[in-house]
């Protein structure tokens, strides 16, 4: 759940891209486990959150995929991916989106076979947030 490596850029880049134990860390601490259990309780007790999330998913799909024809995965989940040509482009697009106030992870090999931008919607997003995302995606070159 944490650690530190000091080294030059080549070493850090190598570790980020080749260290399976860093990329695929899955062990949860007791605190993380307790938080996950509490999240399950919230989902059961507050079904409106799930409904709002599904509305946000549909709003994003209608705008990004339907209206704008962006090459985004047509997902049933709140996670959407935008394929890009290579790792450098993924990092550039991720940085451009961040400059526009949007966090979208640049995911690249070896984690995935094709570089992509990964976006996650939440129930707390409002329609204007989704519109901001779609506009930003249209503005960046990928």
Image (cartoon, rainbow, N blue to C red):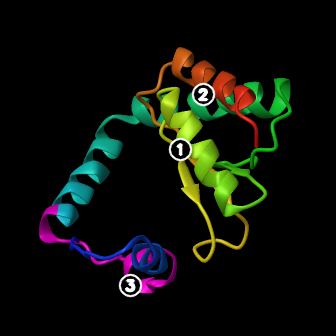
Q: Which residue is mark 3?
A: 21
Point out the image quarter for the C terminus. top right
Q: Residue at x 73, y 67 (%)?
A: 114
| Residue nearest the viewer, comparing 92 with 2 | 92
Q: Nearer the viewer, residue 100 or 37?
A: 100
* Quadrant of image for the N terminus: bottom left
Q: Is residue 51 magenta?
A: no
Q: How many marks?
A: 3
Say the numbered circle drawn on residue 104: 1
Q: Which residues are magenta?
A: 17-31
Residue count near mark 3 (Cα–Cα under 10 Å), binned few <14, some 14–19, many ≥20: few
Q: Judging from the image, what secondary structure is the residue with disc 1 in?
A: loop
Which of the marked residues, 3 or 2, is nearer the chain's N terminus?
Answer: 3
Residue at x 69% of width, y 49% of height: 75
Q: Secondary structure at mark 2?
A: helix
Q: Tell me whether the residue at label 1 lies in contact with that at label 3, contact meaning CB atoms closer than 8 angstroms.
A: no
The x and y percentages for residue 124 are: 40, 28
| Residue that carries the numbered disc 2 in the rendered image | 133
Give the x, y percent position of residue 25. Answer: 36, 77
Indicate the secondary structure of the residue bearing disc 3. helix
Q: In this rendering, would 53 be left or right of 135?
A: left
State the CA–CA distance, disc 3 to disc 2. Answer: 32 Å
The location of residue 118, given as percent across then percent down, is 59, 51
Residue 34: which quarter of the image? bottom left
Image quadrant of residue 131? top right
Residue 26 in magenta stretch: yes
Q: Say if mark 3 contacts mark 2, CB within 8 Å.
A: no
Instruction: Tell me: residue 63, above or below residue 61.
Output: above
Q: Evaluate if marks 1 and 2 touch, with contact meaning CB atoms under 8 Å apart.
A: yes
Which residue is at 48% across, 80% downward? 14
């Amino acid at each position: 759940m944490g650690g530190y490596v000091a080294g030059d850029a080549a070493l850090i880049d190598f570790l980020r891209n080749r260290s399976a134990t860093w990329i695929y860390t899955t062990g949860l601490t007791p605190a993380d486990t307790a938080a996950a259990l509490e999240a399950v309780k919230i989902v059961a007790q507050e079904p409106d959150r799930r409904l709002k999330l599904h509305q946000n998913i549909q709003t994003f799909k209608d705008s990004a995929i339907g209206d704008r024809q962006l090459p985004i995965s047509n997902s049933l989940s709140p996670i959407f991916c935008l394929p890009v040509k290579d790792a450098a482009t993924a990092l550039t697009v991720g940085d451009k989106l961040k400059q526009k106030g949007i966090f979208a992870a640049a995911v690249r090999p070896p984690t995935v076979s094709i570089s992509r931008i990964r976006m996650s919607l939440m129930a707390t997003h409002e329609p204007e947030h989704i519109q901001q995302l779609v506009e930003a995606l249209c503005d960046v070159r990928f």
